[in-house]
Image (tube, rainbow, N blue to C red):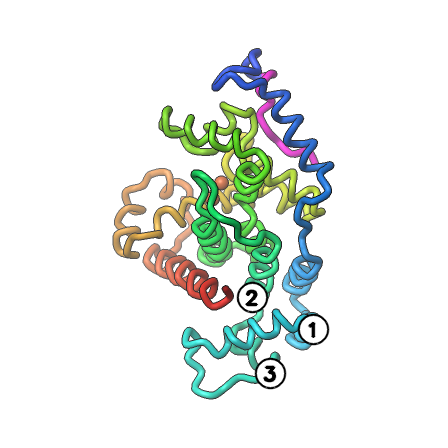
Amino acid sequence: MRIFFNEPSLNTGDSTAGGGLDKIAVIAEIRQTLTEVRDLPTLPTIVMEVMKLVSNPNSSVSEIVELLEEDLALTGKLLRTANSAYYGVPRKIDNLKMALVIIGMDEVSNLITSSSVLKMFPSRPDSEGFDSAAFWRHSAATAEITQGLYAGLRLPKNSGAYVAGLLHDIGKLVLNQYFHHYYLQCTDYALEHSVTPARAEAEVIGVDHGHIGGWLAQRWNLPDEIINAIAQHHIRPADTPQYSFPEMLDWADRFYSLLNGRTPDRVIAMLMKNQEFLDWIGTRSIPLPNLVNDLFNRMERSLKLQEILK
Ligand SMILES: [Fe+2]
Ligand SMILES: [Fe+2]
């Protein structure tokens, strides 16, 4: 699949504009690292297997149990989660099948996915300008919110929503870990010019973290829809259809910023005055309080569950 992105040299005629770096060379360097470097983390196969099971309406709890039984660490985490105060079950849950029933299929697959992805990127000390705990909080919450937007807008369920939400900013992590000097240049530029991180990256290095994440997702052989949603969650062609996957991801990302640190009532009041949001929702008759409260609960749940999974 072709991943859309702005070729800096083709657009501006000057590949060094916006920070002085030769963007063509930088893009080539990043792509080469993402296609050739051997020690890049690999996506655990269980993530793909779970995604397959969830996308199949005929999958059963026993199939998930079968998939999980061999993984003692995950089984332990799920039992711990089912027994946590969050679910408030009065008796002790000591078998996986019961745990799955209590947590629910969707949420179990979310938990498996997020704990597997977190394992791939062991926490390291925060580097300058990068707070990895905040990064994963944002990623897990955006994953839940993406699923919530599909449900709230009554769109057909998207089995890749959670994975895409969880990995949507993975390009930022790549930039920070493998190209820290570029990462800092981009964050400085964003501050100096009051632009979004994605805009700053596009202007300084010629490609934003969405596209960088898309290249990594491509290396992991994720489905094309997910690759594209990650790649285009900030910058996408003008003719991208409404409610397309990249656009849903973009809104989920923005919803996190809106919900985080605010009360649902405040968010509802803000949205009612936000013309861009109202245009986006258009004629879809959704009760705004229901949508916002649901997204808020999902965000809270993802944060609580991340604590339990630690
Ligand atoms: Fe992003
Ligand atoms: Fe984001």
Q: Residues within 10 Å of mark 2 (few under 14, many from 20)?
A: some
User: How many callouts does the rendering have?
Assistant: 3
**Amino acid tagged 3:** Asn
Name the one closer to the observer, 226 or 68.
68
Q: Which residue is mark 1?
A: 63
Indicate which disc residue 255 carries: none
Give me the residue at 67% from left, 37% from top: 34
Q: Which mark is residue 95?
A: 3
Amino acid on which disc 2 is placed = Asp
The CB of the residue at mark 3 lies under 8 Å from ligand 2: no
Q: Position of residue 26 (x, y in %)?
A: 61, 24
Q: Earlier in the sequence, mark 1 or mark 3?
A: 1
Quarter in which the N terminus is drawn:
top right
Looking at the rendering, which quadrant does residue 59 occupy? bottom right
**Residue 225: image x %, image y %?**
64, 45
Residue 3 horizontal/vertical position (percent) = 65, 34
Q: Which mark is residue 106?
A: 2
Q: For the residue carrying disc 1, how many other residues have a C-alpha within 10 Å: few (<14), some (14-19), or many (20+)?
A: few
Instruction: Determine if the C-beta at disc 2 is less than 8 A from ligand 2.
Output: no
Residue 154 in view here: no
Residue depicted at x 56% and y 17%: 11
Helix, strand or loop for disc 3: loop
Disc 1 residue type (three-letter):
Glu
Who is closer to the viewer here, 296 or 245?
296
Residue at point 54% right, 52% down? 166
The span picked out in magenta is 1-10
Whether residue 310 is situated above or below residue 39 in the rendered picture: below
Instruction: Please say whether residue 2 is one of the residues in the magenta stretch.
Output: yes
Look at the numbered discs 1 and 3 and tell me whether their residues touch, using CB distance below 8 Å: no
* Residue, far front: 125
Label 3: few (<14), some or many (≥20) within 10 Å?
A: some
Q: Is residue 158 above or below residue 218?
A: below
